[in-house]
């Protein structure tokens, strides 16, 4: 089996620091140890360090805290005007990550280090081999490793997407931006993807990044601006999203009577359900039929309770999502292409109906082996598979099924949400990799920790303090949780906030003499 997190050896992001950074002292345990930092060492919290063990060779460790003390300033001896420098000490605590054994497996040392041993800055090679950050070529390049910024982070696309992934963070922390980075990598690798895009944020991947602040950072991440053209944007409403490539049309005849009942704007009683079942049976007798045909058939029914059903069907018809030639799933999933269903301006219930219909058709087709393996990415996933009891969506059931069975059929799922506590727990816990940016809401933090095996309170504290654009990666795709500075995007970002206070509109300067005098007469007389 290929390593799942690796670094393209052709990319060299910086020099490793040479020399020792400190000396181990006091009692040394199996999990962590303290060491005295050299005066000139510049390591900080989160930095990777290494210690040579007489049995295991080099062991990778990571600094978890640094404390500064000064005997002159201990409470018992403290006096004001003394020289500070000589007795100031910096004490670091480091956790032991482990060493790689002859089979390439990361192991914890069973015999502790000895006090007096030197601690060194870890080199890229040791970090890569210990964290599984190694391999050749075709990984998903996310950014630079926090604690050793010379190390780029590449993730194995198979491990990442086949076993599902979640991207979770509070609003504005950088979820959609990180997802944009992921999609750029999917486009680079030609992995077919369908994006459910409720806000119309992802078509901007077609344009190269022109953001000056981001362009300045590109060299650091070793990337260049680029727009992607292997993207197809669909939307139910071309009038709202005129730049989309094609209208998205749902196939009315593919809706089961049960789906149709759920999709109606209001709940209908069993008498109306009976009329609907009967009418669909008649319609199916004619072969192909439209929603208009079905409404006509219902109108022919003699029961008086048909009128409410007709009103419901008419309002579904007026959504116009069945108008036109139905979009084929083969148009949505194509080798080497990313498709976007831009749902901006679409009613929430209709969004759910589209997600349910498309996901079901794709899952069934994948089961029959009719489509290439692909990834389904769902933004604002809390709306499409909400936690039971909190809200309902017609698409919940199929997304739960894909989360639990998609892997077997080569259908990956990526769920993105600002409210982890509001996503179906079953879906969340089926994601084997989590990309978590800053989260502060206690309910969301609880939902995250409950959905990840072995999630420690240290990680919870870490998540609360993350800066925008910095992600904690946990799960099967990494040997150990790592923190990554997500790289800037090659293409433009379509999300982001809109300023509430806008720049004043630029004034129109009129130079034409006759217009000028007219304005003078009208307004300044
Ligand atoms: N890795 C990054 N590099 C540079 N800028 C970033 C990065 N991540 C986020 N940003 C900046 O932060 C802003 C907000 O990010 P983003 O749109 O991804 O937020 P979000 O978490 O999706 O928010 P929401 O929940 O409101 O959709 C972006 O417009 C971008 O300017
Ligand atoms: Mg977003």
Image: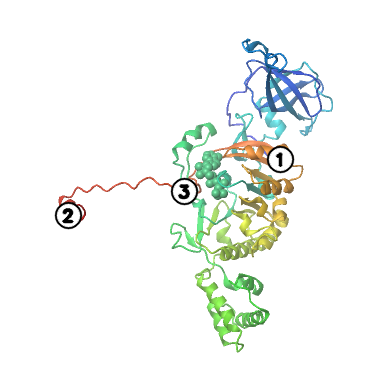
* Percent x, y of residue 338: 55, 52
* Percent x, y of residue 385: 65, 58
Q: Earlier in the sequence, mark 1 or mark 2?
A: 1
Give me the residue at 61% from left, 38% from top.
466
Q: Foreground residue, 57 or 1?
A: 57
Mark 1 → mark 2, Cα distance in angstroms = 79 Å
**Element at label 2:** helix
* Percent x, y of residue 131: 70, 34
Give the residue at mark 1: 2
Question: Quick check: 503 above or below 39?
Answer: below
Q: Earlier in the sequence, mark 2 or mark 3?
A: 3
Q: Earlier in the sequence, mark 3 or mark 1?
A: 1
**Element at label 1:** loop
Give me the residue at 71% from left, 43% from top.
475
Q: Nearer the viewer, mark 3 or mark 1?
A: 3
Q: In the rendered structure, are the residues bearing label 1 and label 2 in contact, judged by CB atoms less than 8 Å apart?
A: no
Mark 2 → mark 3, Cα distance in angstroms = 39 Å
Q: Nearer the viewer, mark 1 or mark 2?
A: 2
* Percent x, y of residue 274: 66, 81
Give the residue at mark 3: 498
Q: Foreground residue, 339 or 462?
A: 462
Q: Is residue 126 left or right of residue 343?
A: right
């Amino acid at each position: 089996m290929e390593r799942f997190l690796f670094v393209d050896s052709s990319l060299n992001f910086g020099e490793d620091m040479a020399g020792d950074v400190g000396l181990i002292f006091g009692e040394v345990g199996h999990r962590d140890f303290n060491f005295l930092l050299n005066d000139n060492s510049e390591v900080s919290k989160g930095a990777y360090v290494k210690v040579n063990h007489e049995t295991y060779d080099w062991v990778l460790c990571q600094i978890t805290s640094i404390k500064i003390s000064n005997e002159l300033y201990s409470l018992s001896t403290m006096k004001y005007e003394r020289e500070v420098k000589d007795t100031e000490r910096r004490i670091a605590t480091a956790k032991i990550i482990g060493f790689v054994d002859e089979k390439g497996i990361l192991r914890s040392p069973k015999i502790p280090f000895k006090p007096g041993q030197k601690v060194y800055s870890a080199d890229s090679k040791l970090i890569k081999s210990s964290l599984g950050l190694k391999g050749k070529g075709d990984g998903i390049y996310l950014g630079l490793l926090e604690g050793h910024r010379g190390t780029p982070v590449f993730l194995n696309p198979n491990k990442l997407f086949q076993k599902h992934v979640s991207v979770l963070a509070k609003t504005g922390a950088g979820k959609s931006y990180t997802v944009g980075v992921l999609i750029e990598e999917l486009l680079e690798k030609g992995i077919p993807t369908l994006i459910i895009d409720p806000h119309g944020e992802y078509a901007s991947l077609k344009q190269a990044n022109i953001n000056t602040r981001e362009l300045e950072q590109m060299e650091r991440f070793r990337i260049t601006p680029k727009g992607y053209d292997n993207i197809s944007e669909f939307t139910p409403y071309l009038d709202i999203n005129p730049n989309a490539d094609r209208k998205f049309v749902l196939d009315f005849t593919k809706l089961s009577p049960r789906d149709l009942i759920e999709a109606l704007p209001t709940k209908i009683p069993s008498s109306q359900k009976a009329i609907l079942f009967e009418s669909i049976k008649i319609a199916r007798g004619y072969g192909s039929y439209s929603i208009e045909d079905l409404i006509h058939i219902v109108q022919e029914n003699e029961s008086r309770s048909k009128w409410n059903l007709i009103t419901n069907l008419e309002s579904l018809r007026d959504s116009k999502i069945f108008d036109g030639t139905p979009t084929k799933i083969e148009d949505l999933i194509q080798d080497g292409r990313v498709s976007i269903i831009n749902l901006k301006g679409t009613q929430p219930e209709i969004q759910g109906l589209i997600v349910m219909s498309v996901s079901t058709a794709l899952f069934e087709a994948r089961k029959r082996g009719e489509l290439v393996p692909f990834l389904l990415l769902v933004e604002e996933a809390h709306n499409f598979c909400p936690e039971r009891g909190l809200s309902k969506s017609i698409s919940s059931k199929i997304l739960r099924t894909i989360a639990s069975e998609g892997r077997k059929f080569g259908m990956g799922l990526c769920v993105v949400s600002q409210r982890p506590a509001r996503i179906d727990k079953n879906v969340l816990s089926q994601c084997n990799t989590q990309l978590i940016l800053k989260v502060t809401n206690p309910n969301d933090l609880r939902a995250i920790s409950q959905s990840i095996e072995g999630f420690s309170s240290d990680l919870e504290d870490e998540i609360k303090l993350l800066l925008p654009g910095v992600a904690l990666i946990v799960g099967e795709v990494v040997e150990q949780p790592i923190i990554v500075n997500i790289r800037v995007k090659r293409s433009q970002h379509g999300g982001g906030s809109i300023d509430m206070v806008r720049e004043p509109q630029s004034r129109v300067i009129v130079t034409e003499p006759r217009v000028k005098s007219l304005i003078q007469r009208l307004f300044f007389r």
